[in-house]
Amino acid sequence: MIQTLEWTDKGVRFLDQTKLPTEESYVTATSYQQVADAICTMVVRGAPAIGVAAGMGIALGVKNSKAETVGDLKKDFDQICSAIGETRPTAVNLFWAIRRMQEKFETLRVRPMPQIKQALIEEAQRMHAEDIAANQAMGRHGATLMPASGGVLTHCNAGALATAGYGTALGVIRAAVEQGKKIHVYADETRPFLQGSRLTAWELMKDGIPTTVISDNMAGAMMSYGKIGAIVVGADRIAANGDVANKIGTYTVAVLAKEHGIPFYVAAPISTVDLATPDGSGIPIENRNVKEVSHIAGKQMVPDGVEIENPAFDVTPAKYVTAIITERGIARAPYEDSLRKLAEEAVVGR
Ligand code: MRU
């Protein structure tokens, strides 16, 4: 099984995704600052994985704190949370994880310091385990929507590498394949960071799931040739009305899907649903270093001095989304009602 990230006695161990697909190497962050840096530089990426990394980063910072009173530990904790919160703005799972750790801390304030530290470590580890279970549940729900055979297109990487394991969109594909469906994945390469060709193709190859990589501008043609029976992608944040922020290029795929009458599914855990944001216009979109666009593998591809934009995400309006697959079931339009109902369902056992 792919170990995207894990808690160890030394710190948080990441599979370094900047090195894939040619090198499978691991780095251990031994301070919360190093965890924050791993999120910013995309050593770890993908909304659910960012959330779990944030939880573990906070636990690590608290573990390393030299504070001698609970009051001082709380000051350190607040400072750690705000540093982690500055890393990437779009994936709401980051802020969901910080809030969860804050709520946990509140319940622990009367306890002795070693117990507080241990409980926060356990909370972060719980998030990791819960994310895998959520993905498996999403897979069970979503597999029913996948065709019995044929092409399924995905954009970016919403797989084991983007989560604690198994994946959201790729979890749905994995579950469908486990049920005997004969799926052939079309993976958009996903410029500029190439999560599709570097990461999705890498993890599907490992699982022996047939995959074809296409450049992003080939997706429409593949749809018009009748090669794509369904599309499934992940999400970084889903607004209350069902508008979906996901990797730049997702919007293009969704519009093309509508034109070709192909179902467009989004798979994401409830922690990605942001009921406090009414629609997609309120979702902050991260702009990343323009060098990701101007350079490919270190080689300059754009003349000096040309203006470049590099928004990392776009927003797909809810009207293009056929259904949203969550661990608690499948939401359909009107999403204001269906998402709220799923999101507000009582969480048993926590
Ligand atoms: O910039 P990234 O690689 O973090 O973007 C990842 C995506 O857009 C994924 O599709 C999304 O986070 C869902 S991952 C299960």
Image (tube, rainbow, N blue to C red):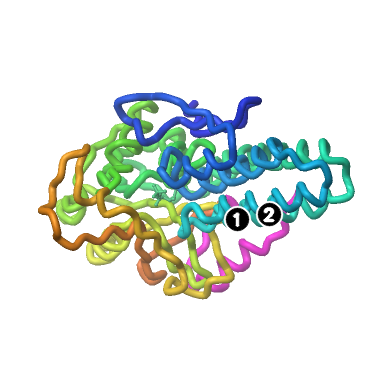
Label 2 close to label 1 by CB (< 8 Å): yes
- Element type where label 2 sits in the image: helix
Instruction: Give the residue displayed 62% in from the left and 51% down from the top.
Output: 97
Read off the magenta span: 327-350
Q: Is residue 139 in the magenta section?
A: no
Asked if residue 108 is positioned above or below residue 256 in the image, the reply reads: above
The amino acid marked with disc number 2 is Asp
Residue placed under numbered mark 1 in the picture: 82
Label 1 crowd bin: few (<14), some (14–19), many (20+), radius 10 Å: few
- Element type where label 1 sits in the image: helix
Asked if residue 81 is positioned above or below residue 199 in the image, the reply reads: below
Instruction: Give the residue displayed 23% in from the left and 37% down from the top.
Output: 212
Query: Residue 248 or 319: which is nearer the viewer?
Result: 248
Instruction: Give the residue displayed 55% in from the left and 65% down from the top.
Output: 274
What is the x, y in percent for residue 263? 34, 58
What is the x, y in percent for residue 345? 68, 61
Residue placed under numbered mark 2 in the picture: 78
In this picture, residue 344 sits left or right of residue 240: right
